[in-house]
């Protein structure tokens, strides 16, 4: 190759690389500054197709009940402004568990709700809601095993799940809890859902529980798995198999999701919240000083879960000044501790750049957690 040709190729390559660099920056910045206006909810009807799920009284099938409820929940949510609904399935088809999680992750969903029905060889009854966790005992393991066993119907499940055995307690407990940082919000939603089942539908309350479900493990957002009731129970199975029963459950789940979103909005503060307080316009360039919030401390909650982690930077993607607080059987991890709201906003942004996309600001006064929005309104 002569030197002139080599020089032309070198120059051309250089300009191509520069072009690619600027295009990359452009799209990167577009992604960073683009605002996602819709709250994305992924609704997952358990089982489907060749997998009927549990079969109950009068041969009612879990896959049919779950699908009917999910479609009705989705229809109700779609009527709400700024809520986008995505389904893992809308018909009677078989969907791999890993594919259900992939759908939610690809959509950058804010919430994942999986609907199922329970079964037992007795006349057990009641509704329960599950979140991802390691609080596994023999009784809870049987529930997880039943829901996870569907992977045995999938092609190449050994490859997709890296040797995971749904019949092995060690395999279940050994799953990496990649979704641990969303546990707090998952429990919040699950508690709201259970409250609706118990108070409004008058269902027997079997509580909010934790276990390792593969379908929840695959998702990277607050996620819950609902066991609406026991289709093997004569009374409950008849109710769940009826149009009225499915409609009531759909309404209850819908109301729970909407209530959760409202609570989420109250506990988080957007950038423009500083511009509108008490219905009066405030200069967006106004700096909120430390003196504005005497006796109030702001922190950024970046994670929560059952594991007790050393608060060293290597455990939190290089973040320093992490505080660990035990709440019940779980631990919450906070970044920062300041009365300066501008400073805590900077720390929240830092946490998000480190990958803690669900990081949110919390406020404390005299050791008690208070509403961030109330603090701003009173300022």
Image (tube, rainbow, N blue to C red):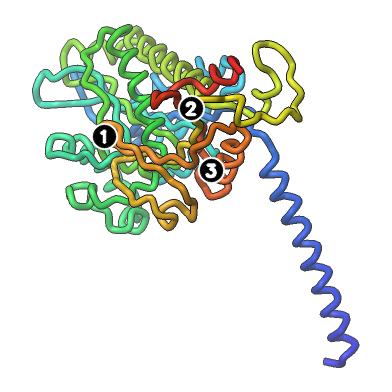
Q: Residues within 10 Å of mark 3 (few under 14, many from 20)?
A: few
Residue 347, horizontal then vertical, whole percent: 56, 42
| Residue situated in front as seen by the camera: 250 or 216 | 216
Q: Earlier in the sequence, mark 3 or mark 1?
A: 3
Q: Residue at x 75, y 61 (%)?
A: 21
Quarter containing the C terminus: top right
The Cα atoms of the two marked residues, 1 and 2, are separated by 27 Å
Q: Secondary structure at mark 1?
A: strand
Residue 366, horizontal then vertical, whole percent: 41, 24
Q: Earlier in the sequence, mark 1 or mark 2?
A: 1
Q: Which mark is residue 59?
A: none
Instruction: Examine the rendering and report whether any part of residue 84 can be seen.
Output: no
* Residue 287 appears left or right of 252: right
Q: Secondary structure at mark 3?
A: helix
The Cα atoms of the two marked residues, 3 and 1, are separated by 25 Å
Residue that label 3 marks: 106
Q: Residue at x 37, y 54 (%)?
A: 160
- Can you say whether 187 is above or below 375 in the image? below
- Can you say whether 21 is above or below 155 in the image? below
The Cα atoms of the two marked residues, 2 and 3, are separated by 32 Å
Q: Secondary structure at mark 2?
A: strand
Q: Which mark is residue 210?
A: 1
Q: Residue at x 73, y 20 (%)?
A: 282
Which quarter of the figure has residue 97?
top left
Q: Which mark is residue 363?
A: 2
| Residue situated in front as seen by the camera: 102 or 288 | 288
């Amino acid at each position: 190759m002569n030197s002139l040709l080599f020089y032309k190729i070198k120059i051309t390559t250089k300009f191509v690389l520069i072009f690619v660099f600027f295009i990359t920056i452009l799209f990167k910045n577009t992604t960073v500054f683009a605002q996602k206006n819709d709250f994305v909810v992924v609704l997952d009807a358990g089982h489907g197709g060749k997998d009927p799920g549990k079969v109950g009284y009068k041969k009612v099938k879990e896959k049919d009940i779950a699908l009917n409820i999910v479609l009705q929940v989705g229809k109700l949510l779609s009527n709400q402004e700024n809520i986008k609904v995505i389904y893992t399935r809308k018909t009677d088809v078989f969907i791999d568990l890993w594919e259900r999680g992939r759908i939610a992750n690809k959509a950058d969903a804010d919430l994942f709700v999986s609907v199922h029905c329970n079964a037992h060889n007795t006349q057990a009854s009641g509704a329960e809601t599950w979140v991802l966790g390691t609080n596994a005992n023999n009784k809870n393991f049987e529930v997880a095993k039943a829901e996870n066993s569907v992977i045995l119907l999938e092609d190449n499940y050994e490859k997709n799940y890296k040797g995971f055995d749904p019949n092995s307690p060690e395999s279940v407990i050994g799953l990496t809890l990649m979704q641990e940082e969303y546990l707090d919000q998952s429990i919040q939603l699950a508690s709201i859902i259970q409250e609706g089942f118990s108070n409004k539908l008058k269902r027997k309350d079997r509580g909010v529980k934790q276990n390792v479900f593969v379908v929840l493990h695959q998702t990277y957002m607050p996620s819950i798995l609902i066991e609406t009731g026991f289709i093997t129970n004569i009374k409950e199975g008849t109710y769940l198999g009826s149009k009225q029963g499915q409609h009531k459950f759909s309404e209850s789940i819908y109301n729970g999701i909407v209530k959760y979103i409202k609570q989420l909005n109250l506990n988080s503060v957007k950038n423009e919240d500083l511009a509108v307080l008490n219905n009066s316009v405030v200069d967006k360039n106004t700096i909120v000083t430390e003196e504005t919030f005497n006796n109030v401390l702001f922190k950024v909650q970046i994670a929560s879960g059952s594991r007790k982690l050393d608060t060293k930077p290597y455990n939190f993607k290089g973040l320093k000044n992490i505080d660990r607080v035990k709440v019940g059987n779980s631990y919450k991890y906070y970044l920062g501790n300041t009365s300066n709201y501008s400073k805590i906003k900077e720390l929240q942004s830092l946490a998000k750049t480190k990958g803690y996309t669900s990081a949110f600001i919390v406020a404390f006064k005299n050791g008690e957690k208070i509403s961030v929005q109330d603090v701003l309104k009173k300022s």
